[in-house]
Amino acid sequence: MTNIPLVDLHASHAEIADEVRAGFDAVLASGAYIKGPDVAAFEREYAAFSGVGHAVGTANGTDALELALRALELKPGGGVVLPANTFVATAEAVVRAGLRPVLVDVDEEHLLIDVEQAADRVTQAVALLPVHLNGQLAPVDHLLEVADGLPVVEDGAQSQGATRHGRPSGSWGRISATSFYPGKNLGAYGDAGAVVTDDAELADAVRLIGDHGSARKYVHEKFGFNSRMDTLQAVVLRAKLRRLPAWNEARRAAAERYDKLLGGLDGLTLPRTLPGNEHVWHLYAVRVDRDRDGVLAALQEAGIGAGVHYPVPVHLQPAFRHLGYAEGAFPVTERAAGQLLTLPLFPQLTEGQQARVAEALAAALRRR
């Protein structure tokens, strides 16, 4: 029996292979590998998709977040409030931008940034950095209410196409960053990212810093670094962006099927959508009340490509020991880290494959 992968990148590629091949041939013929016309075209298209005026392509999502923070010219060493329940790259970008992560816990039901805790940390901060997790937006509208004038920077690495109260990811904060890592809803064929904003001056600053601080060749106005999207990645992203609304709808349908197949299983908590959100289901992560790792092993033995995201929270990573947080500092995040289990989800996932996943998961839960 064929294994079911966590993410099937081959299936997505099959849908765009001819278009990408033609685009690559055109780039190879032109030799415009950096700052080619496809990059500019993708930036315009992604800005429109995100409901903002400007998008700047970058080499990856972590760079995008650092560039967004650096463009704001925040006070060096200032605190940036972000949730403990996130990938380490969020905190890395803060440190790389010369700032200090100020972590807060998440809510128990949706595992998104706790607004009350964030409000309590505003006086220690120069910015708020909500993370749109697993395909749905954080309660960014409420964060704007408590921000007390501080800029809100969205980490939209997992939310391309998601909305809150009808407004797209990337259009709520002063500036936003996203990642086009291959496994994302909108994934490149390698690393890539983007910064989006309605502020033309911020967009110009991001572009300047990400191109060695240079708007004119060999004249460097600011200290920058190299983080430019290459043209081949833009070709892939343009082809995928045209299909992204349909692919996100397919993800929503798959999530609804999982809800029906898995509802009522003992010892399992299904993911929930925050009211006002339209979810795009980058990940479908359930919570197993005990022996998560044993259930994971049983699924993998059955040929199900399940996985675990963020088993060690940011504050307990050796690289961030200097922040001074001890075990127990963020109990909701820590509890979730030991319970979350990510199930296969991608646009081409079939009902039959999902039935196999559900059967294997039910069997694994019974054997604990």
Image: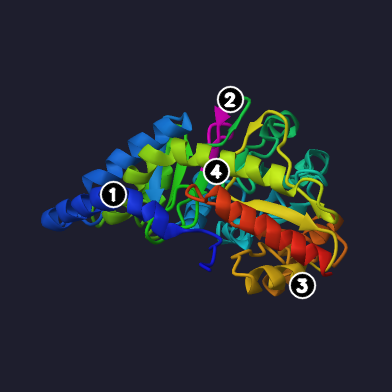
Looking at the picture, which amino acid does disc 3 mark? Gly
The earlier-in-sequence mark between 4 and 3 is 4
Residue at image coords 51%, 67%: 2
The earlier-in-sequence mark between 3 and 2 is 2
Q: Quick one: 93 or 368, which is closer to the camera?
A: 368
* Marks 2 and 4, how far apart at CA: 18 Å
Q: Is residue 228 visible?
A: no
Q: Is residue 246 above or below residue 282?
A: above
Q: Residues within 10 Å of mark 2 (few under 14, many from 20)?
A: few
Residue annotated with mark 2:
166
Local SS, label 4: helix
- Secondary structure beneath disc 1? helix
Give the residue pinned by disc 4: 251
Q: CA distance from mark 3 to mark 2?
A: 40 Å
Magenta residues, start to end: 166-176
The reply to whether callout 3 and callout 2 are in contact (CB within 8 Å) is no
Q: Are marks 2 and 4 in contact (CB under 8 Å)?
A: no
Mark 3 to mark 1: distance in Å?
A: 42 Å
Q: Which amino acid type corresponds to the residue marked 2 in the rendered image? A: Gly
Alpha carbon distance from label 4 to label 3 = 27 Å
